[in-house]
Image (spheres, rainbow, N blue to C red):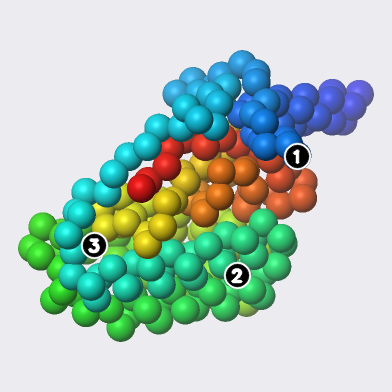
Amino acid sequence: MKKVLVTFAVAAIMVSCGNNGSANEHGDMHTGDSMPGHDYAAAADDIKAISVQYTTIDPGVSSFMKGMMQDYLQVKNALVNDKAEEAATAAGRMHASMKQFDKSLLTADQKKIYDGVEEDMKEQAEHISENNAIEHKRSHFSMMSEDLYTLVKAFGGGQPVYHDHCPMAKDGQGAMWLSEVKDIRNPYFGDQMMECGSVEEVIQ
């Protein structure tokens, strides 16, 4: 009896998640009850747009951030498609790029922001690059996403970047990720709950 109740509860949560602000196959937004702190019923045109903190940065920093964003998106898309090896390869490139980055290109204030996430981001990228289960990679991806979000808000990512959030990730604690597209493509669940989540903002 308990197993039946648990099954129904999980099914109800999945249906609820699928109806909260995720895009359908036609690109329209589903509506539903909002979770605290998240406007899942917001239309795509109502996405909050924010500008990067530093509009003028060294070209070397701009190139570094563009490369980091491209590798991160490859990690994200690999997790969306349940491809652990591809995620590992892209994360390995991110780790290598950070080790080679010339921090002297940053101003003193910019360096404080970068230093605040550098070691943690290296650690998360290294974990994802290792030969381990995809769920382990997804756990570290959530932390890496928060670190890169900090950097993208400061320096940009070489393109518009969407900040997405899934309330069901991390055992219901919720987790964010960055995306190059408006459509929700959930890296924490893949095919299990591909459209679970909402777009929180776009960083331009």
> Mark 2–mark 3 contact, CB under 8 Å?
no
Tell me how far mark 2 sits from mark 3, CA to CA.
Answer: 23 Å
Where is 67 relative to 191, above or below? below
- Residue at point 75%, 39% (across, down): 25
Which-is-in-front pick, marks 3 and 1?
A: 1
At which x and y percent is residue 102?
Answer: 21, 79
8 vs 48, left or right, is: right
Towards the viewer: 37 or 138: 37
Which corner quadrant of the image does residue 167 belong to?
top right
- Residue at point 27%, 49% (across, down): 52
Badge 2 is on which residue? 87
Which of the image's four quarters has the N terminus?
A: top right
Towards the viewer: 157 or 8: 157
- Residue at point 41%, 57% (across, down): 159
Tell me how far mark 3 sits from mark 1, CA to CA.
Answer: 38 Å
Amino acid carrying label 3: it is Tyr
Residue 67 seen in render: yes
Secondary structure state at the residue bearing disc 2? helix
Q: Specify few, some or many for label 2: CA neighbours under 10 Å numbering under 14, 14-19, or 20 or more.
A: many
> Mark 3–mark 1 contact, CB under 8 Å?
no
Query: Which of the labelled discs sits on residue 51, or is there none?
Result: none
Residue 2 seen in render: no
Where is 3 relative to 35, above or below? below
Amino acid carrying label 2: it is Ala
Badge 3 is on which residue? 114
At which x and y percent is residue 66?
Answer: 38, 68
Which-is-in-front pick, marks 2 and 1?
A: 1
Secondary structure state at the residue bearing disc 1? loop
- Residue at point 37%, 37% (across, down): 49
Towards the viewer: 198 or 10: 198
Badge 1 is on which residue? 25
